[in-house]
Amino acid sequence: MTTTARPTTAQDVLAELHARQGADLPVHGGRTLAYVYDSGLAEVDRVGREAVAAYAGSNGLDPTAFPSLLRMENDLVAFAARLLGAPDTVVGTVTSGGTESVLLAVQTARDGSPQVTRPNMVIPATAHAAFHKAAHYFGVEARMVPVGPDFRADATATEAAIDDSTVLVVASAPSYAHGVVDPVTELAALASARGIRCHVDACIGGWVLPYARRLGRDVPAWTFAVDGVTSISVDLHKYAYAPKGTSLLLHRTPALRRPQLFASAAWPGYTMLNPTMQSTRSGGPTAGAWAVVRTLGDDGYERLTADVLEAVDRIVAGATDIAGLRLVVTPDSTLVALATDGTCDAFTVCDEMTARGWYVQPQMSYGDQPPTIHLSVSAATLGAVDDFLVALRESVAAAVAAGPVAVDEGVADYIRSLDPAGLTDEDFDGLLAASGLVGENAEGELALPDRMAEVNAMLDLASPAMREALLLTFLDRLSRPSRA
Ligand SMILES: *Cc1c(COP(=O)(O)O)cnc(C)c1O
């Protein structure tokens, strides 16, 4: 159904909204193992949603006009500061998400070293793509350092990559793709010895690892307790189980944060004064996060962490027991990466899981690593772990029976040979149609495939540059208004 300009009652609009939402992945139930994080606690959810609604119209742009938002922001930063072993000098900001926190960490490092004309940052190859986005936006070269065989950053290779133009050294706690924590102590020491900033990207682990440690788990040091760590990003909309739209960026001192703050009086309107990339900032996400953190408190998070880690342990034990599957590396936190042996392929397993009501995320091959299956496990998944393992076992069996997804040799050679720089828009359109990624339904509307294995297998053969170019065309074609 398309939206018309005809007025509609609120009741009808909401009914239509909920009907449309039926096409999406479920955000509750713990069966969606990427993109969403479910505490499984209805009360926590309700409190978060009501707080978002109460503040949906409020604007964090001017803290003097909406002082309650400033108080909530400072409360969240104070909570995180305690969690992350920060000194009394620590300061922080609520951002819209992990990517914005990472962007600002890079921008702040760049602008904190104005004397460097061609700045670079040294990042492990496993760092989140948000750092590549930051490189792209801010003209900071991303020097990628291959990780060791354990998928953790290699301190020796990092040291060799640092030079006089390095403004930032990056570590993950943990990395998204493999779920392991980098050797932060070593990396931060390298940076600190040269007077360089060290950012720890704890977007996905920052609200879990401190509780894991309290629960007696073996967690390597990675917080502000480590000398030389200058900033940390931690997402509230991941494992703080807050509604979408909040992350925190903390800096060890106000001086380190200073270049993040922006003011402009160079126009006839109000003096713009912003700590983030946004200017008008909805109060909704901040209030939602504050309400959830306030409801759960330390005890609540400790319990949720115990639950999610138990779920991870059981998934790891169960998955390694399934012939055809292997664990890529023992996880340090709540993220699990699984690979298949030659009897089946990861993409088909993902499709088979979808058919059984589970969403697991395919990860393409990278360097000499094969495609993998990513799981971001939630506390709510604990109650469904047995179901999950049954579905996984069945999915692998179905994928083995089907055999590894095959791409025609001729097509494979062709895709491998393509250079995106030499292709026109029409070429990309043709390739998209040929890939099966976009088709048309009977009404001539854009239609997405139900099964992704063939498409993913084809994308997996393309060079990273080619895959990026194809998916950009895909996004461009998806994002078109219907004028019918
Ligand atoms: C999720 C994530 C990000 C990006 O966060 P968004 O909220 O998706 O913008 C950055 N780093 C890591 C390690 C992440 O897991």
Image: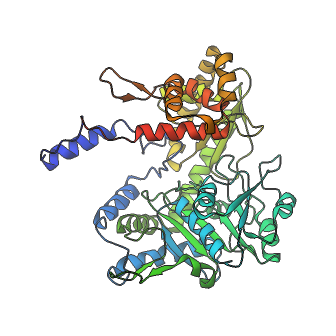
Using residue 450 as the reference point, say whether residue 390 is left or right of it.
right
Give the residue at x 68% y 54%: 127
Residue 326 lies left or right of residue 211; in this view the side is right
Spot occupied by residue 89 in the image (x, y as percentages of width and height): 62, 85
The quadrant of the rendered image in which ligand 1 is seen is bottom right
**In the displayed structure image, the side of residue 146 where residue 130 appears, left or right:** left
The one nearer the camera, 117 or 180, is 117
Q: Residue furthest top?
A: 401
Q: Find residue 191 and report its image quarter.
A: bottom right
206 lies above or below 260:
above
Q: Does residue 406 appear anywhere in the picture?
A: no
Horizontal and vertical percent for residue 113? Answer: 68, 77
Q: Is residue 304 above or below residue 228?
A: above
Question: Which residue: 62% across, 47% down?
Answer: 310
Q: Where is residue 406 in the image (x, y as percent from the top left)?
A: 64, 18
Identity of the residue drawn at 83% across and 50% down: 148
Task: Name the residue nearer the viewer: 103 or 398.
Answer: 103
User: Residue shown at 56%/70% (left/top)?
Assistant: 249
Rendered-image quadrant of the N terminus: top left
Name the image colouring: rainbow
Above or below 160: residue 83: below
Which quadrant would residue 28 be assigned to in this image? top left
Quadrant of the image for the C terminus?
top left
